[in-house]
Structures are given as structure tokens and as C-alpha cells.
Amino acid sequence: MQSFDLLESRGLMEDIFHELRSILSSILSSVELIELYGSINGNGQHGEKTAASSKITRQAGAIKSQVIELEFQLQNIRLLQHILDKTFEPKKHLTSVGFFIRNFIHEEPYDALFGNTAELQMNKEHTDAYIDEFLIRQLVLNMFFWMMKNSPTNQQPRLSFIFEEDHFEIRGGFSANAAGYFFPVYAAKSCGNGNGRGNLHFETELLNQRIYYLISYIVDLHEGSFDINLEAEKNVEIQVKIPYKPSYLL
């Protein structure tokens, strides 16, 4: 009788991961068909959407967002597994970051997810950088869903990609006031350096979420910087800066 040792089966995680991704792809395709059905069959006498059609569209949109989040969280698990097993190797290539980001935020299904909340600010013509495209995607999605969870209901967070002379920035934020949170004048700033001060429960929760470890890890691999600023009585802002060329290539 053949013996099977689970601990020696390192490929099992990959097999399960691919099976789950296939399931999610099927769910996403089904939701898109439901959306199409609602748009074709949901028009009233004057071409206006019926209440039932609008509800189908909203529910389908919510399901799509959840499927996208589940898929990228699975990618997080896969990434963390490789890091813990010490088998992870970043695959950096010289990439036109502006072109890559533009394609990413406008491709399906992310185009509908980001909507009109994502913008590009091109202050430099050539934006070539040594990056791992998969990791940058995970970085952006982690930032976006983190903001979605901490933003007030029905309010989309802001997401900007800014291309400066020697680095590019990924900047996101939401209105703390709109969320019903209040930060005193001494609110914590720059949680990346741990020098913040403040005593509100939300502030404490915000500055101690474990997802920051993964975001910081990805940023460090690209020799960048990562900060979160809580502006008094105003906004919560998360900012990532990544140089176009790592120091050892300068």
C-alpha cells in the first residue's frame, strides 16, 4: 500500500488555490450574465429601469465586489504561505508603471470596482521602474479594500496614482468626518514611524490593523516608504512612495 505524507506535499496548497480561483471565476461569470439579463429585460415603457432591474444591478454589483475581494484575499494567503515557507521570490521587471496602472484600473472586473474613484496624475513622461506587477496589484487592492472597510457606508474612498520625477505615489484616503469619527488636534500622524499620539478607540484600531504588515512588506521589497496620516478633524490618508530605480542600480 502506497504511503502519502501530507507534510511533503508542498504543491497541495497550489492545487487548492487554483481550484478555488476556478470556482470564483465561474461565480463572477454567472453574476455578469445576471447583470446583462437585468439590463436587457429591466427597461420600462420609456426606457427607464424598473425597480426590480435596479435591485438586480445593485445586488450583482455587491456580489462582484465580494468575489473580487475573496479572490485577492486568497492571493494574500498564497503570498503569506510562500513568505512563511521562505520560498517567495519577487519577480521584478523594468515596467512602464503608468501604462501598467492605467491598464490595471480599467480592466475587468476592476474597472467597475474602482469606478471614478481612481485617478492618474502624470507629472513625468517616462515612468519606468523595477517592480513586481503582482505585488503592486496586491498592494493597491489591499489599500483599496482597507479604505472601503473603514469608509462610511455608500461613500467611495479616494485613490490617486501620482508620477513624480524620481518616484511614483499611491495615495488613498477618506473623510473621517463623514464617517462620524473625530480626531483631536493631537491625533496620531505617520503611523509608519510609530510616533503618533492619541487616545480614541477608532484611532487605536486604525493604527494597529495587521494588514499594514503585508503592505509594509511589499513596499520594503520595492525600497519605498509607507505612511498613514490622521489629519485633525479632517481626513485619513494612506500614502506609499516607490522609487523608479532601486538604490543599487543608481
Image: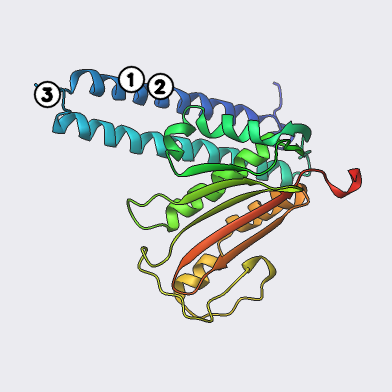
Instruction: Nearest to the eye among marks 2 and 3: give it.
Output: 3
Q: Give residue 39's quadrant in the image.
A: top left
* First in residue order: circle 2 vs circle 3: 2
Residue indicated by mark 2: 29
Callout 3, which amino acid? Gly
Q: Is residue 13 visible?
A: no
Residue in the image at 52% along x and 42% along y: 119
Distance from disc 2 to disc 1, alpha carbons, whole Å, reads: 6 Å
Q: Residues within 10 Å of mark 2 (few under 14, many from 20)?
A: few
Q: Is residue 100 above or below residue 215?
A: above
Q: Secondary structure at mark 2?
A: helix
Residue indicated by mark 1: 33
Spot occupied by residue 231 in the image (x, y as percentages of width and height): 52, 70
Q: Give residue 12's quadrant in the image.
A: top right
Q: Is residue 111 visible?
A: yes
Asked if the residue under mark 1 is in contact with the one under mark 2, i.e. CB atoms within 8 Å, the reply is yes
Callout 1, which amino acid? Leu
Residue in the image at 37% along x and 63% along y: 179
Asked if the residue under mark 3 is in contact with the one under mark 2, i.e. CB atoms within 8 Å, the reply is no
Residue in the image at 78% along x and 39% along y: 87
- For residue 118, the mark is none
85 or 131, nearer to the observer: 131
* First in residue order: circle 3 vs circle 1: 1
Count of numbered circles on the image: 3
In the picture provided, is 85 more to the left or to the right than 145?
right
Q: Secondary structure at mark 3?
A: loop
Q: Residues within 10 Å of mark 1 (few under 14, many from 20)?
A: few
